[in-house]
Image (spheres, rainbow, N blue to C red):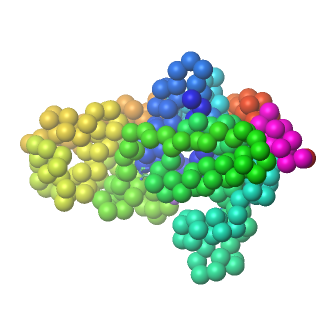
Amino acid sequence: MRVVSGIQPTGNLHLGNYLGAIKQWVAMQDAMGPGEECLFFLADLHALSQPVVAAELTSNSIEMAATLLACGIDPDRAILFNQARVPAHSELAWILGGTARMGWLNRMTQWKDKAGKSGESQSVDLFTYPVLQAADVLLYQATHVPVGDDQKQHLELARDIATKFNNDFGVELFTLPEPFISKAAPRIMSLRDGSAKMSKSDPSDGSRVNLVDSDDLIVQKLKKAKTDPEPLPATFAELADRPEARNLVVIYSALAGITTDAVMAEYGGKGFGVFKPALADLTVAMLGPIRDRLTALLDDRAAVSGALAKGGARAAAIAAPTLAAAQRAVGL
Ligand code: ADP
Ligand code: NA
């Protein structure tokens, strides 16, 4: 089993990113047995599909890598790197661009959603994004790719490209990757509005817990989190139309690693005067050590770059024979 997954580099990560994305990667890494491996990369080339500010892209990449390391990605077990430092991604993407068809890309719903009426003013990279994604995984002969609903179509496309390439050139080169179905990631909502996603782009800092927040700030934000005057009910299902209360229970369950009903078994009948301090204690206990590691790594960016460079070298070594075989197959 070889799992390959990428994430766009962003800075100022928050509790929603941790519980909804990063924690899943750590769980995948921890689930790997002997002879299995995870390759995790920062999709910095994909970031170019939207306008970028150079200095921001650089610092976001370092911040994202530091966050992954602080949250438990172990660079001795998982292979952590940035895409741009492994040129084989770009090289294979160009080769696969000869196999992929315009019509296939035109049918991608993400392109259709983002392109607007004509797509005329979009970058070429936004259109060919799924070809680079295909290269990202086919390059490593990935057997499994974790995908959310929004990415299923792109993984299908990677399989179509691999199949057509293998057929067109009469080779058994590319492994067809399967979707990796992991435990559903929780969706964390804003602390101020239970109908909005917790997001770094929310102008209210009180709407989210940032991974760099101090213990005091975490406590203060959770104390001020919007709720309602009712005590917690006996079962999670009864919270269906109480989105803010529901969200706090989801956060508790995800941080504690227990089911939402187990949370209700403990706190059902109790009010937020009891539940919020318990949630604040748990959050500080779980995020405090992450923040401390993150702060130390952000003060030692050379160490983060070093870890990425080491991962990049390991990734490049795995990629080399597949890229060479693809070049041979097409006559380069
Ligand atoms: P943001 O919405 O803060 O800009 P991104 O869009 O950069 O976050 O998302 C990075 C990763 O974190 C994605 O895998 C995304 O699904 C996950 N994620 C972001 N916000 C949340 C959230 N509120 N709950 C769960 N997962 C989230
Ligand atoms: Na976003």
In-image side of 261 versus 52 (left or right)? left
Which residue corresponds to the image point at 48% horizontal and 26% vertical from the top-left? 31
**Looking at the image, can residue 294 be seen?**
no
Comparing 298 with 4, the one in front is: 4
Q: Quadrant of residue 279?
A: top left
Provide the major secondary structure of the magenta segment.
helix
Q: In the image as oriented, which residue stretches furthest toward the bottom?
A: 117
Segment tinted magenta in the rendering = 321-331
Asked if the stretch drawn in magenta spans residue 40, the answer is no
Residue 328, horizontal then vertical, whole percent:
86, 41
Residue 294, horizontal then vertical, whole percent:
56, 35
In-image side of 280 versus 136 (left or right)? left
Q: In the image as oriented, which residue stretches furthest toward the top?
A: 34
Q: Quadrant of residue 144?
A: top right
In the rendered image of this protein, does residue 182 appear above or below residue 237? above
Residue 288, horizontal then vertical, whole percent:
43, 33
Q: Quadrant of residue 40?
A: top right
Which residue corresponds to the image point at 11% horizontal and 53% vertical from the top-left? 230
In-image side of 281 versus 328 (left or right)? left
